[in-house]
Amino acid sequence: MQHPDPGDPGTGTGVAQPRRLRTVTGPLAVSAVRGPVLAHEHLVLDLDHAGDDGAAVLDADLHRPAVVAELTALREEYGLGLVVELTCRGMGRESQALARISAASGVPVVAATGWYYEPFHPAELDGASVEELTATLVGEIDDGFGDTGIRPGVLGEIGSHGDSPTGPETRALLAAAHAALATGLSVATHAQLGRGGLAQLELLTGAGLAPHRISLGHQDLLDAPAVHRELAASGAYVAFDTVGKESYQSDTVRLRLLLALLEAGHADRVLLSCDISRHAYLRSEGGQGYGHLFRSFLPRVRAAGVDEDLIDLMTRHNPLRFLTGADTKES
């Protein structure tokens, strides 16, 4: 097992954190990210092979021009500084396609490793121990995706569904925690419809991972302000990362939930994104696109009285602190 290189995040044990991110086109200084970050997106994705009838596909060749066009426009109009791409093992991840998208759009991209929730688990999880799964993740983090030389910069989106993870989901979550401790990467989860975030947090922290290195996914789909406050109070990040997915939750409800969390004093624990996961969500196909956060939702947040410093905190400082494992507001 190799040790993390000098550009990797630290271990989260109190040691000062190096200030570089792992992107699909190489190391990137945190200080180079001057604009907002999309904290949970998919640029290339294929879940159809696992029996999802919802056509949750962003084909690397067919849809790449539209994805590049959207990211380029967001960089030019809003200064988009980084995309955290959480397509992991078994989800149709294509690291070289991500590198081409990043290079063509001029937007840095952080890729991921780990396993999604159980209906989409590949056969490699069958009967594998936590130790074996951990070794798989650490190997990919240390050595990269195959022979591409591209390495992940985050563990995610590590999934579960329901109020408690299933047995295989528990093993995947524990493996992610152990890999995070071994390599310094942070962990972003998929909590199906927002449920199970507290159980995920308990499992990950029980394995020794600090809460500030954990992001609990899809909490904007759970209309439970008390749960959001509890997650944030622990020090974990609360991801409102399906902004614009009105068929799951209205942005009106999302705004109410976000404002409640801000009013409770937890702006420094919020992550925001759109989780574009179907080609029908692309603007070229009439969808809301990756820019819905900037074009529609954040103007409503501003209209509700949230100032630019807090918006910059949520959209830039917070995701950078999460990725680097830092537990201060400096980034």
Image (cartoon, rainbow, N blue to C red):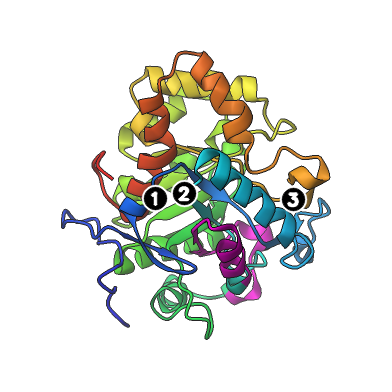
> Is 48 placed left or right of 88 in the picture?
right
Residue 145, given in percent of the width and then of the height, sits at 52, 77
Real-space CA distance between mark 3 and mark 1, rounded to the nearest whole angstrom: 27 Å
Q: Residue at x 32, y 68 (%)?
A: 183
Real-space CA distance between mark 1 and mark 2, rounded to the nearest whole angstrom: 5 Å
Per the image, is 119 magenta? yes
Q: Residue at x 53, y 39 (%)?
A: 78
Residue 288, given in percent of the width and then of the height, sits at 72, 37
Callout 1 touching callout 2 (CB < 8 Å): yes
Q: Of marks 3 and 2, which one's residue comes earlier in the chain? A: 2
Q: What is the three-letter code of the residue carrying label 1?
A: Val
Does dot 2 land on a helix, a strand or a loop? loop
In terms of depth relative to the viewer, which is nearer, 6 or 234? 6
> Is 289 placed left or right of 112 in the picture?
right
Q: Which residue appears farthest toward the front when viewing the image? A: 76
Residue range (magenta): 97-124
Residue 330, given in percent of the width and then of the height, sits at 24, 42
Residue beneath disc 2:
81
Q: Residue at x 54, y 27 (%)?
A: 298
Q: What is the three-letter code of the residue carrying label 3?
A: Arg
Real-space CA distance between mark 3 and mark 2, rounded to the nearest whole angstrom: 23 Å
Question: Which one is in front in this view, the residue at disc 3 or the one at disc 2?
Answer: 2
Residue beneath disc 1:
33
Residue beneath disc 3:
278
Does dot 3 land on a helix, a strand or a loop? loop
Q: Which residue appears farthest toward the bottom when viewing the image? A: 147
